[in-house]
Amino acid sequence: MKKHKLLLIDDDKELAELLSDYLATEGFELISCHDGVSGLEKAFDDSISLILLDVMMPGLNGFEVLKALGGNHKTPILMLTAKGDNADRILGLELGADDYLPKPFQHRELLARINAILRRIDIVQNTKETSTSHEVNGVKLNHATRQVSCHDNLIELTGTEYQIIAHLMSKPGEIISKEEISERVLKRKLSAFDRSIDMHVSNIRRKLLPFSPSDKLKTIRSAGYIFLAGETQ
Amino acid sequence: MKKHKLLLIDDDKELAELLSDYLATEGFELISCHDGVSGLEKAFDDSISLILLDVMMPGLNGFEVLKALGGNHKTPILMLTAKGDNADRILGLELGADDYLPKPFQHRELLARINAILRRIDIVQNTKETSTSHEVNGVKLNHATRQVSCHDNLIELTGTEYQIIAHLMSKPGEIISKEEISERVLKRKLSAFDRSIDMHVSNIRRKLLPFSPSDKLKTIRSAGYIFLAGETQ
DNA sequence: GTTTATCTTTACACAACATTTACGTTGCTT
DNA sequence: AAGCAACGTAAATGTTGTGTAAAGATAAAC
């Protein structure tokens, strides 16, 4: 799991220090800006995963920063504020904030909210339209029974073979590296001269072949395998 | 803008009616389930954009539904509850909820929170596409599939050819020296009389040519190559 | 224990790819 | 215009990753 960088925009330097320590123990790196203007600049840094934005600041306040970011900023924003009243909360959300946490807050709640936002982004990024529908390009998976059928012909796959084809089918049309398959399915690092994956893919191909007009598993030399998504595009 | 379908899981039928009317005026379609079990089934319906989940329910309660969904459900979840205490809120978020709204709430706040979640998903999905594909001057790269298309015609490039064109396209209109290409792509110093790069560029040109009105790769004698940026200058 | 199914390694052939060679062409310098 | 260095590219050569049969290792079932 990669380490996330967070940006705190808040004039309260004491809080910044506290949060920096706490979030570090949770595996985050906290960067601080103490006024709206400098925060606004940093907000476009793509390496930042999430912005913690305080409302009450001298100069440019939190709402003004939000407005300046234009309502659909690439990086998610969690608002922090002393004022807990509804109108502010709603305004913040309508201006483009992703969430809103009234001060004072428990560290654990802040953490839970940060994680909720980052988790959602992760899920969205790793999910394709087709991932829960189990049929792609004539091959149908039944997760419950672990059965696979190819153009309505039932195929017998072993557990590993099933997991590999399921993984490839979760991102049809995308290259999946052998490293990824090894780590996700075989639960070990891919070492040099390890030909296991190749063998499994070869076996899957052999079992699909009698019922398939074309090879659905494409090899991308020195990159990985693709489960072809049907109509080429 | 497409109409979103929302799923409300709450035993309070009066609230369901109220919300259904209100959300309809805001362009949402609300579907209701009045117990955890039937809600759990509906939760896997891909046509649903967001789930509103009440905590206090007879039978399976909200937390149990969350647990059953496994913590990273595809559809985002907004928890509703009468209990406003912190521990519950945090627990819900940690169990996989995206947000938490204590009852009673203003309709406008619910709307703002729903929109905040849907907006974030929309932003992530749109930036995802632009981050995996890169188009310059009629040539499009798709990093996930390592496919290259030239004016919508698919081109087959080898790994090295792909890396070279990707590198040239990362700085369109700029001269990239052979030394740089050699070190970045081939991972070795360019030695005298080494014609590899020339060959690769030649092969890329040959593959692009049938679909390209003009040569997009320009040679700058004794300096390097440029991927032309298009109309400008 | 044995048998059976499954996974991994070994071995070799082969195809895809990268690189070098060789020779023709271009464009700069004097 | 001659000379030369850089480039284009066809063809030959070198290298590497992949396909797969078969053997070996491991785990599960009996």
Image (cartoon, coloured by chain):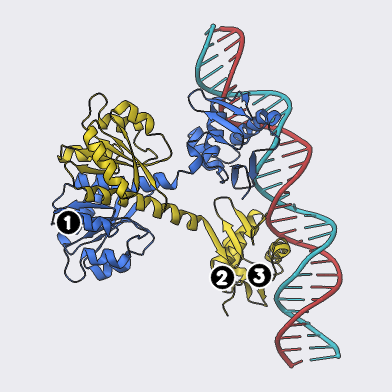
Chain colours: A blue, B yellow, C red, D cyan
List the residue tagged with mark 2: B172
Give the answer, above or below, for where C4 lies relative to A47: above
Residue type, label 1: Ala
Between marks 1 and 2, how big is the CA–CA gap? 48 Å
- The residue under label 1 is A87
Regarding mark 3 in the picture, which secondary structure is present there? strand
Residue A149 drawn at (x, y percent): 60, 27
Badge 3 and badge 1 in a common chain: no
Q: Which amino acid does label 2 sit on?
A: Pro
Q: Name the residue under label 3.
A: B217
Subunit under mark 2:
B
The residue under the point 68% across, 38% down is: A215
Residue in the picture at 52% in, 25% down: A146
Q: Would residue A78 be seen by someone viewing this image from the given angle?
A: yes
- Quadrant of image for the N terminus of chain A: top left
Q: Which of B53 and B218 is in front in this view?
A: B53
Residue B155 image offset from top left, x and y in percent: 67, 56
Q: Do the residues labelled 1 and 2 touch (CB within 8 Å)?
A: no
Question: Is residue B187 something that shows in the picture?
Answer: no
Q: Where B170 falls versus B48 (above or below)?
A: below
Classify mark 1: helix, strand or loop. Answer: helix
Q: Mark 1 lies on which chain?
A: A
Which SS class for mark 2?
loop
Q: Nearer the viewer, mark 1 or mark 2?
A: 1
Say which residue appears at 36% left-offset and 45% top-offset.
A120
Disc number placed over residue B175 in the picture, else none: none
Left or right, residue B229 beside residue B89: right
